[in-house]
Image: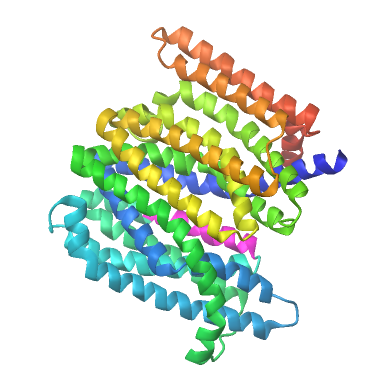
Amino acid sequence: MEESKTSYKHILKSTFLFGFVQIFNILIKIIISKSVALFLGTEGMGLIGIYNSTVNLFKSFAGLGISQSAVKDIAENNVAGETEKRDTIITIVNKLILFTGLLGGVVIIIMSPYLSKTSFGTTEYTLPFILLSIVVFLTIINEGQLAILKGLRMLRILAKASLWGAFAGLFVSVPLYYIWGLKGIIPSLIAIALVSVTYSSYYVKKVGNQSRTITVKETLRKSLPMIKMGLALMYLSLAGILSEFIVKIFISHTTGIDSVGIFQAGSTIIIAYFGIITTALTTDYYPRISAVNQNNSALTDEVNRQTTVGLLLIFPLIIIFLFLMPVFIRILYSPEFLRSTAYLQFAVFGILLNIGSNSMGMILLAKQASHTFVWTTTIITCLTIGLNIALYYFYGLPGLGISTIVIACMHMGLMTWIMKRQYGIRFERRVISMYVLVILLCILAFFTKDIHNSLLRYSTGGVLAVLSILYTLTILKKSLGINLIYEFKKRLNKAK
């Protein structure tokens, strides 16, 4: 029992550690999003959404997953007293990311007329897509530099590189939006990418690695395992980005770029802002389950702990968000974006389900069951594209939100079935009971938004919010042995 409580404390500690970095980045994104909403409106938000999807698509395709697979290779060669092996693999990584960066840039230049025609039904946007090649190149280089810092376990330096890059990006982009309006979007994206890669490269050089002379033949031989692993990871990333890109293009052609901006605003809240919790949780979760990937009993414990902590942390946030949704939209964007609540009020439930399904799904990566992971990803991606397009066509933005719930349920069902059938891993009864209670209370919060009397609406939502917070604190203290208020005060006193 003591070991279990220690494990829960470790999960919380690592979650808060990585969460603080995420929160800072999110605050920067909020300010930028608010600036976009004020200076560029829904059309500007839609353009940025399509441009970012394009960059992510070509970055994932051309990057060959090197920024992810390189972390493992660098970490394995980062042995005390053997700097030559470490420097050699870093030199290879630098060569690979330079090649893949150039590849991404050239491909998007060649494809630019087709991208403009596909995205907007005209070739007038060919030049902006050509200029995006610079963003793709710089982004691939930046992610490669960050991968080196991750592999060397320079987490503090990694945080500094990320934070300073985001902070500088804020001061570059907002003035461009203000001065040039919609014409400032492409220069802003280039400037942000340039600032980010400058900071990450600076911190990599500070580590003091020596570049090694390596032949092309040796580079290819030593990089093949990294590329092979990277291709599998690239497919997973590409599937999600391609799905999002296709849906945005469909929305653009069906109801216009303005609707893309509304959807982009909503999906940013779901993916980026609530992603603070999910990203912070998974950062430490994957190394833990990788260490015990052959022990299904230990994996069962880890899945249930991860899901429990994830639910307890995100439960109060969703309750508060559901009844204060219009307030948050006005703060984050502007009243013009209130239409996104039609999507958000349903999509937020998908987050709850993804806490559990992602905990299960990552076991396939830890076990290196790439074949199973690829076919499950393919199924979910096809369902996502099909359902999103069909439900948006018939029901608009609410349809996209409902689609998110349906897909999350399918993913949860598929992952739990695979885990139980292949490895005997399943959710404990207490976790299932917690899921049921959390979902029921969130459904109650969902209906508070329809109460016309403001006093009754906010008082009802406030009671549910207090109950959710008390529930989280009680379970953490009594069942898991974690006094969150005491731990927070202790950290606060240390900071002073």
Q: Picture quarter containing residue 198?
A: bottom left
- Which residue is depicted at the point 19% across and 43% down? 253
Q: Position of residue 324 (x, y in %)?
A: 46, 23
Is residue 292 a member of the stretch shown in magenta? no
Where, quadrant-wise, is the N terminus in this rendering?
A: top right
- Can you say whether 431 is above or below 98 in the image? above
User: Do we see residue 174 in this rendering?
Assistant: no
Where, quadrant-wise, is the C terminus in this rendering?
A: top right
- Which residue is depicted at the point 53% across and 62% down? 161
- Which residue is depicted at the point 27% across and 41% down? 260
Q: Which residue lies most toward the right here?
A: 2
> Is 229 on the left or on the right of 168, as rendered?
right
The chosen color scheme is rainbow
Q: Which residue lies most toward the front here?
A: 421
Q: Position of residue 412 (x, y in %)?
A: 55, 38
Please identify the dominant SS of the magenta region.
helix
- Can you say whether 221 is above or below 359 in the image? below
- 468 or 175: nearer the eye? 468
Q: Which residues are magenta?
A: 154-171
> Is 406 on the left or on the right of 261, as rendered?
right
Q: Position of residue 263 (x, y in %)?
A: 32, 38
Is residue 161 a member of the stretch shown in magenta? yes
Q: Position of residue 94 (x, y in %)?
A: 50, 78
> Is 221 on the left or on the right of 254, as rendered?
right
User: Do we see residue 61 in this rendering?
Assistant: yes
- 424 or 493: nearer the eye? 424
- Which residue is depicted at the point 57% across and 17% down? 464
- 240 or 496: nearer the eye? 240
| Total numbered labels placed on residues in the image | 0
